Amino acid sequence: MSARRVAVAGYGLSTIGRDTGLSVLELCTQAIHAALADTGLRPADVDGLSAYSFAPDTIDAYGTAAAVGMTGLTWVAGMTEGPAFAQSAVSAAMAVASGMCDTVIALRAIRRHTSTGLPHTATVGGDRQFTQVFGGGQPVQWAGMYQRRLVHELGWDEAAIGTQVVAQRRFATMNPEALHRAPLTLADYEASPFVSAPIRLLDCDYPVDAGAAVVFTTEERARDLAAPVVLVDAYSLGVSGERTFEHARDVTRTASHAAAAHLWRRTDWKPGDVDVAGLYDGFSFVVLDWLEALGLCERGGAADFVLGGGTAPGGRLPVNCDGGAANVGRIHGVNHVIEVVRQLRAQSGPRQVGGARVGVVSNAIGPFAGCLLLTNQA
């Protein structure tokens, strides 16, 4: 059986905040109900569920399905490895394309945690035993090393990273859902404290309690629904061959480059056709890495592209038009899918990119990464 064309039918968000008091199950069920309301579908219309999570916020996929009344599931996947929401989204798209099911909800839920690491009395095993003892137990610490090496090897002007942060805040000021909407200047960015030099506090995504759901279905079913159709033209996952982020042989060519190369082999669209992008910003330098990995600018040219206003409102390729995870909150990439879908539906209000036809979404960096290409063109 040939692969079927897949569409994004809708999306939904839970209550999002710093300390909502909501459980993972509550975040998931809120997001699912919102997504079903967006599509006009009922729980009984959904026959697949794809959930990405990891401890301590593990999603009970079957329990979540039962809680919202999904009684006709023919496929369920609960994943704890891979590039965050991209893993869940690609799995959902593949399930629909293969005919395993017709309508799949892809889920991500995460809560804000205030722990800053392991207590000094804790013991660790595996690879962490070689980093934890030197105080290297947090993602921001390997990320700082990545950024420093990328700047050195590629000749980036480091001011571009702050410029990208400011550009995303400009978008956030136009997004009523953003948690940070106050205008931000480059001087404000440069005054923010280092967390793990050269990464500053404003380079980091914003920890929140959040749940999000995206509905994937067949093109035929999507055309029967009220919302404008957004097709999933291609999707890809990639790895770089290392066990951990710290083991990267070359931080200038990690899994983002592998995933991007595979994506363009699976579509007739080209990087120059992309009108809008949602690029992972767990740390702001990752946006620049994806610009180059996806061929949206030349190798070593991401900094100049950003400094020239290419990713800002009105730029040649607006990026993270919702404000990104630094402003709407850490949802591990679901927000990027949602915003690109909104852009392709022409539903983004004052931050709308005129005539947007093709959008790309990405997730992660390091050992694993994923991306999707979306379009409103038949």
Image: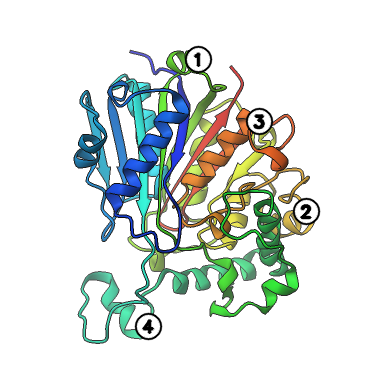
User: In this figure, which residue is indicated by the disc labeled 2?
Assistant: 309
Residue 28 sits above or below residue 72 on the image? below
- Residue type at mark 3 is Ala
- Could you say where residue 49 lies in the image, as x and y percent from the top left? 29, 34
Q: Are marks 3 and 4 in contact (CB under 8 Å)?
A: no
Residue 279 sits above or below residue 207 on the image? above
Which image quarter is the C terminus in? Answer: top right
Secondary element under disc 1, as helix, strand or loop, is: helix
- In this image, 120 relative to 189: left or right? left
Which image quarter is the N terminus in? Answer: top left
* Residue at 66%, 64% in the rendered image: 161
Q: Which label's residue is closer to the chain start, 3 or 4? A: 4
Of labels 2 and 1, the one closer to you: 1
- Residue type at mark 2 is Gly
Secondary element under disc 3, as helix, strand or loop, is: loop
User: In this figure, which residue is indicated by the disc labeled 1?
Assistant: 223
- Residue type at mark 4 is Gly
Q: Callout 2: few (<14), some (14-19), or many (20+) C-alpha neighbours within 10 Å? A: some
Q: Which label's residue is closer to the chain start, 3 or 1? A: 1
- Residue type at mark 1 is Arg
Q: Callout 4: few (<14), some (14-19), or many (20+) C-alpha neighbours within 10 Å? A: few
- In this image, 215 relative to 325: left or right? left
- Could you say where residue 201 lies in the image, as x and y percent from the top left? 56, 73
Residue sticking out furthest to the front? 21
- Could you say where residue 348 lies in the image, as x and y percent from the top left? 65, 38
Of labels 4 and 1, the one closer to you: 1
User: In this figure, which residue is indicated by the disc labeled 4?
Assistant: 135
Q: Separation of disc 3 and disc 1 at Cα? A: 17 Å
